[in-house]
Amino acid sequence: MMMKDQKGQSLVEMALLLPVLLLILVGIIDVGRVLYSYSHLHLATQETVRLAGLGKSDQEITQFARDYLHIGDASTLQVTITPNEQNRSSGEYVSVTLHYPLQLLTPIISKIIPSPVQLQADSTIRVE
């Protein structure tokens, strides 16, 4: 019976599977980042629209949204307030929409899904 040395087999198998496992791991992290970022953006929108309902100015509302956001670069956050402060009056509704571009980490997924991913959340409240 002839015995062969198979010490390198495990190393070759690991070398073949490690990139795939790392890609799956980073993909899972990306999905988690997108879900967390969307959840945080939605919460930021709800808190921001409350200020609009209390009669704050568009500049104060935009600054609050940028200060509240802590998922990345707040300067890339786009805040849309409808209607603007000159056209808002008590009893009407005001909407705030936040747009945030989130850069993906996974190189292959970013080739399939356009990166950055554009996250959007909006909320409406009645002006007091």
Image (spheres, grey):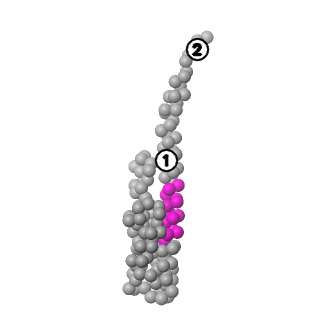
Rendered residue at 48%/38% (across/down):
19
Q: Is residue 56 above or below residue 38?
A: below
Q: Which residues are magenta?
A: 32-45
Task: Give the spatial CA distance, label 1 vs label 2.
Answer: 40 Å
Secondary structure beneath disc 1? helix
Q: Amino acid at mark 2?
A: Met
Q: Earlier in the sequence, mark 1 or mark 2?
A: 2
Q: Amino acid at mark 1?
A: Val
Which residue bears the numbered disc 1? 26
Rendered residue at 52%/24% (across/down):
8
Secondary structure beneath disc 2? loop
Q: Residue furthest top?
A: 1
Counting the numbered discs, the total is 2
Q: Is residue 5 left or right of residue 106?
A: right
Rendered residue at 48%/79% (across/down):
51
Which residue bears the numbered disc 2? 3
Q: Does the magenta-highlighted stretch encompass residue 38?
A: yes
- Residue 6: x and y in percent read 55, 21
Q: Residue furthest front?
A: 67
Q: Quadrant of residue 86?
A: bottom left
Q: Is residue 53 above or below residue 120?
A: below
Q: Residues within 10 Å of mark 2 (few under 14, many from 20)?
A: few
Q: Main secondary structure of the magenta part?
A: helix
Rendered residue at 40%/55% (across/down):
115
- Residue 24: x and y in percent read 51, 45
Quadrant of the snapshot with the N terminus: top right
Q: Residues within 10 Å of mark 1 (few under 14, many from 20)?
A: some
Q: Quadrant of residue 114?
A: bottom left
Is residue 98 in view?
A: no
- Residue 9: x and y in percent read 53, 25
